[in-house]
């Protein structure tokens, strides 16, 4: 199977998420990194590319122009910049006929997001948004169980995504990851809401198959001097009558990356935690004992089997789930380019439309908080 | 040490909580049950008392009258009836000069609660409200840690109390425990709010030492035909700037009695779950590893040591915590009657004023929901 | 139901296990402590009894003589002394026609144990040995599941009982509990073997329904100056072909009272830990998910229901399990005295014959170690 | 950094461990698969290589000959065949001047293992044995903590590695992975001992830094018709006086791949489980609370940091640990070939000598069992 040639925007020396994308792209051998505009600083961009032994470009425009003309040029652009620098390279890549894999949240504003949705529809390219947590096998198992009616109609959704790394003003110490995340010009309207809330929101919709119709928010900024929320308390109302709560935090000690989703249906509940991703607790009503579904261990839905590489007892983690988004993306790209259909499970990757919903979620939550915690439609 | 003679109202044959109170009262040998008006049905009341070998009475008024005149009469009345039948016997007992131990929530209405506060102040009797979860040693440890500044100023409180036993309309099957809890005439304004929410609310205030200033609620009734909430989503604002979320449910599969409290301060967090009550997770910021504080195991605050009976590794449970409320109540009663001071930790038992706060909490939450999820002062 | 009058030998001021027995006896209201010879020091014995408000005796012989002659005298003697002081009061009580509840291990030597077996048979009194861990509801559930064939024939048993409180020479600091446990004259042949190993051994036989045919031991004494083992590694061979491993330790940091039993059958396994006693993990073969059986929560065997007091989610602990031994003992005593049959589950309490097996187990393990880890018949 | 070209022996279509090695080699981008003799069946070997798009060879001899002559030929041979087919290709590769990465156990017999030790010493090539569990960051943390004296002198080691996939005679159903593992001609002297015991043994020596001096074994074959052990109970005596127990099983329901190591020192214990590899429990003596060390989260030893890729809360798993062995191997190979020193932590990969110890361990255990569970020197 041939490897898809990709070029990266952002992700230079010292960046966390760029390195993650590269490992995820490598794990299954479906991609080959060939070029990069790895920093907004041209010199640093060239240097970082040299380190990686790929074709160096000072910026994304030069990169797209340069790759376009080569027979061995990139077929796909991966975007791992801060939020404010997603829209421009994504749009340019799409318009140059390249597929796009883009980090989340989709963009800086709802308007940018809408523009990208239009661009994807216009160009017909594959667009993959890396809400990577939906790549976990047991998250897909949970989705399949809900869809198959195994827990009955969904009643109550509890989703939370607390972290603690911004409990102190890390941005004042020159920590680059912190600095852009607390800056409205680079991060957008949401602090924890944008960085974590969009993941939590997507996961809740992905697994339940329901849409959040309205949100109500109480937003807080606990660290003095910040302009964006670093903790957010939300109530949710879903299509079909389900209700939920959503909590995100960057200031909750003891939580490294504690995304957790609990779904309570009429007949059973599901409980999944990102930090222990190889288990899914399935608790039926009626006196039956709760069951610990294990990745690889038990008879799982095909969508879960599709997203796993190892037998039970051999833990998979964050990189494997991230790689699943890439592996599914590769299927879609090859199917697109070669005119055949990928396996259907590959279509589970988050799409540009999911990115737009995430942006609307952030905007609605911020509007709710500004209105004194009023219900707002998403 | 002499045993305190007590009489019970409610708690006849088949009642759950009455039997719990009796075991709790027995465990430490500080009380002796001598009389009872154990049912609202006089015949059943007499029968149940005979079964227990105590002085039987057809109703609480007869009991108070009868015990009052005896040299070996009850000194204390324990009330374990449904909510609507707390106020009358409690007031009558206080006015007869008896001490009162009363199950929660305090009463049917805020007005009844206010009347009991006045009666306690007027009579000067000891009044203990059995918010039993505050009797757990590690709950008291958590309170002491917060008070001592060990986690810094409180920022975010997450408290939840889901159950699942009412996920189906059990009340239609003649289950007595279910029937009164879903009946506004017996339960009051709150369904899950009154039965579980008052516990969760009290626990949050007890441990943080803060007061909830306002609440915002989205209430649901998932089981058709019910008139009270069976699921409740609340946002909280505390004095001093802390914020919180509170979830109660009677319809969340997989949750038997899953009260959990998490408190995030500026410097550390605490995490305690009622179903695993012998551990308290203490997670400091700054790269230090989380610590599993164990009941009995580690250097704990005196208030926690005071509430424990066994060394580490010998699990205590629900009855021991409940018994702690009784043991502390006994200290207070003896101190009152003998004119000396009990150990200060004994004063940690919930009081009539805590009961009034619980009633106000329920009323504010219901008003919030009726106003479309507006913030309401407690 | 009338309360059984009991007298206690040992368990004076400051003793741990005596207080535990008293709480266990009180919890269900089936016993009343009336007299005591609470210390081997007569003055201390009198003083301790006065503190408890019971009839004081300077020694067990005086106590048995004194109680025997009274219409309201003790019917039952509870023995909570160190091992070397079990045999004499137990035998005297039996011969005086009193029932006996005795702490474990049964005696100092195999010979003493055999003599007590003979005394019980001769006198026909009820004899209960407080291997209290067999009183846990989920331990009885495990036993019932094995018996019902739910895990298939037993293949592999893993049982361990590590503690850490003797990892340093606590006995040199005047800690009384430590001092007698490391003294062969008071403890017998076994250190951790006698104190913990007899519990683990009993639990393995109790749950599997199998007998250990032979043992092989490697015994260690890690703390300098000790004369008994403080860590023991054993291999087990059971009747019917099952094999096992048994570990006890008093020097294993991080283990407070970490008794754990795992049983692997042809079709499923069971896993129970004393420090989390309200769960029993049941893992079937063949790709089915493991199930978390919960006390009170799920359809359990009658023997487990019999041993529980509270619904699911209301944790029971060490005292409740200990109290179960007392409650079952009360059933047996009343049945004996009133000439009717107790419920059959009450007969699950450990008996004098179990105590003899425990003594033989210790003797065989010590003999094995002395023979360079040879297999020895139990 | 240039990629090291490697060729694979074994690991054709359908093989589990071959695919694992390839993912592990890819994750960090340090290796490039260029050739393969992927099956003992020449036709299948050619076919499998074609599927992977690499240079195909019918057997390892042809492969070594073919690659040797090319400027772009393989520099390293990876061996992922059953045990009996390790020695020949490994020796041939070494003698052809190629580096070797070989799956465990090292060989079929002690003699073969000794011969490979000699070959490595003679040729001076890099030899990496994939005891992959030693690649986990928190395993290296545990080793570093022991070495730094943080738990005091080691007293008691408990190591276990149960699985359940061979609880039924899977080998009779044509399952290829099962078939060779139960066949002495392909697996060697040990069943669970060779497949799992060598891992457990290596892990215990790796982390403690101690050598096992003697073992005592009770071996079982529970599934009828098998000629090798499918369950093994061992006692261990370490240099320096530490003692241990080691359990391996292929017939223990509920255990997928449940390798666990617990080490108890004079001052603290460590507890690590492969199925939850991102946590290491560190329990100090003396009343301090146990600490949950997290990968990435806390101040860890450099050796642990070296072996990790992601921040706390982003779980790493089996493939990352396996990849660490490859990454460290790459460092050693480049250092060897370019004549400079790799970072010292890269030398932690298991070596040919560790493989020889593993073979001696199996032989000693089998001899012990044959002698009726006598102590045997390793």
Image (cartoon, coloured by chain):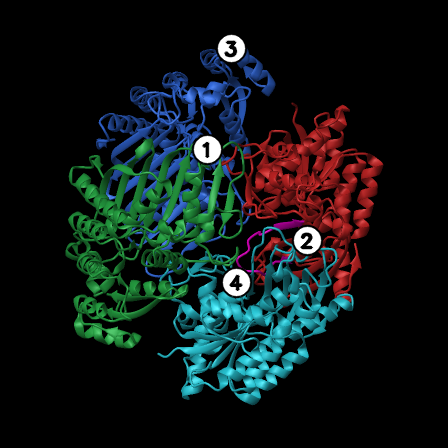
Chain colours: A cyan, B red, C blue, D green
Of residue C57 and residue A219, the one placed in the foreground of this image is: A219
> What residue is disc 3 on?
C42
Give me the disc on residue A364: none
Q: Is mark 2 on a helix, strand or loop?
A: strand
Q: Nearer the viewer, mark 2 or mark 3?
A: 2
Asked whether residue B171 appears in the rendered view, the answer is: no
Q: How far apart are marks 3 and 1 (CA)?
A: 40 Å
Q: What's the chain of the residue with tag 4?
A: A
User: Where is mark 4, residue-wise?
Assistant: A269
Question: For this rendering, which residue is in front, A50 or B95?
Answer: A50
Q: Which residue is drawn at 21% across and 42% down?
A: D365
Residue B237 relative to residue C225: left or right: right
Chain for mark 1? D
Residues under labels 1 and 4: Cα distance? 43 Å
Asked if residue D208 lies left or right of residue B317, the reply is: left
The disc label shown at residue B156, or none: 2
């Amino acid at each position: 199977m041939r490897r898809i040639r990709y070029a990266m925007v952002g992700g230079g020396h010292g960046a966390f998420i760029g390195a993650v994308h590269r490992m995820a792209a490598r794990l299954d051998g479906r991609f080959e990194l060939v070029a990069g505009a790895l920093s907004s600083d041209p010199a640093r961009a060239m240097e970082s590319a040299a380190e990686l032994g790929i074709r160096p470009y000072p910026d994304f425009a030069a990169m797209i122009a340069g790759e376009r003309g080569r027979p061995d040029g990139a077929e796909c652009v991966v975007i791992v910049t801060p939020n404010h620098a997603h829209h421009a390279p994504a749009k340019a890549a799409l318009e140059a006929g390249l597929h796009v894999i883009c980090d989340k949240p989709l963009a800086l504003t709802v308007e940018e997001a809408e523009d990208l949705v239009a661009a994807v529809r216009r160009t017909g390219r594959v667009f993959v948004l890396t809400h990577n947590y939906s790549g976990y096998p047991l998250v897909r198992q949970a989705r399949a169980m809900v869809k198959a009616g195994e827990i009955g109609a969904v009643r109550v959704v509890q989703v939370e995504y607390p972290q603690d790394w911004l409990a102190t003003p890390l941005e004042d110490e020159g920590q680059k990851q912190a600095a852009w995340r607390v800056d409205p010009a680079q991060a957008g309207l949401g602090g924890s809401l944008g960085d974590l809330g969009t993941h939590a929101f997507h996961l809740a919709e992905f697994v339940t198959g329901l849409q959040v119709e309205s949100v109500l928010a109480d937003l807080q900024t606990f660290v003095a001097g910040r302009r964006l929320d670093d903790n957010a308390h939300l109530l949710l109302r879903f299509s079909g009558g389900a209700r939920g709560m959503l909590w995100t935090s960057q200031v909750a000690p003891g939580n490294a990356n504690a995304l957790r989703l609990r779904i309570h249906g009429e007949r059973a509940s599901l409980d999944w935690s990102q930090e222990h991703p190889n288990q899914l607790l399935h608790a039926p009503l009626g006196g039956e004992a709760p069951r610990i579904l294990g990745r690889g261990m038990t008879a799982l839905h095909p969508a879960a089997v599709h997203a796993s590489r190892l037998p039970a007892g051999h833990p998979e983690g964050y990189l494997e789930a991230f790689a699943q988004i890439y592996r599914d993306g590769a299927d879609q790209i090859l199917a697109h380019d070669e005119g055949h259909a990928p396996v259907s499970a590959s279509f589970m990757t988050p799409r540009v439309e999911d990115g737009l919903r995430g942006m609307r979620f952030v905007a609605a939550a911020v509007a709710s908080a500004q209105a004194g915690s009023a219900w707002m439609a998403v």
